[in-house]
Amino acid sequence: MGYKVHVGTSSGKYNYPGSPFRVGKATTYTVKDLEPNYTYFFAVSAYNKNGESPLSEEVSKRISDND
């Protein structure tokens, strides 16, 4: 049981290598090695022995050299 973090390089396409990341019951998670000057898109799902929830609402973040 826990959460999955879905990461992508365009809206609705969670194609970042390793995505989705299983993070268990963590309430925070850091995706490492994101390239600066790109925008990334994120959504979360919950899973348990019965299956997986629909994805959360998507959010995005542009990574700068300072992040």
Image: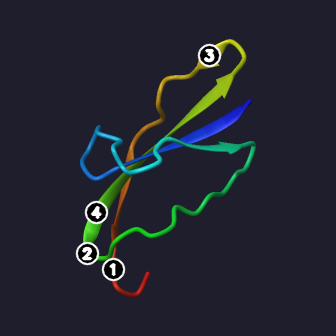
Q: Is residue 21 depicted above or below 39 in this figure?
A: above
Cβ–Cβ under 8 Å for marks 3 and 4: no
Give the distance between the C-alpha atoms of the residues marked 3 and 1, in whole angstroms: 36 Å
Label 3 Cα crowd, 10 Å radius (few <14 / some 14-19 / many 20+): few
Rendering coords of residue 46 (x, y %)? 62, 30
Q: Residue under circle 4?
A: 39
What's the residue type where badge 2 is placed?
Asn
**61 left or right, relative to 29:** left
Instruction: Provide residue 19's location: percent of width, then percent of height.
Output: 46, 44
Which residue corresponds to the image point at 58% horizontal and 21% vertical from the top-left? 52
Of the residues tagged 3 and 1, which is closer to the observer?
A: 3
Q: CA distance from mark 1 to mark 2?
A: 5 Å
Which residue is labeled 3 in the image? 51
Residue occupying the point 40% across, 51% down: 17
Residue at horizontal 35 percent and vertical 85 percent from the top: 65
Q: CB atoms at circles 1 and 2 under 8 Å apart?
A: yes
Q: Residue 4 appears at what percent x and percent y? A: 58, 39
Work out whether mark 4 precedes mark 1 in sequence or the reverse, and give the earlier one: 4
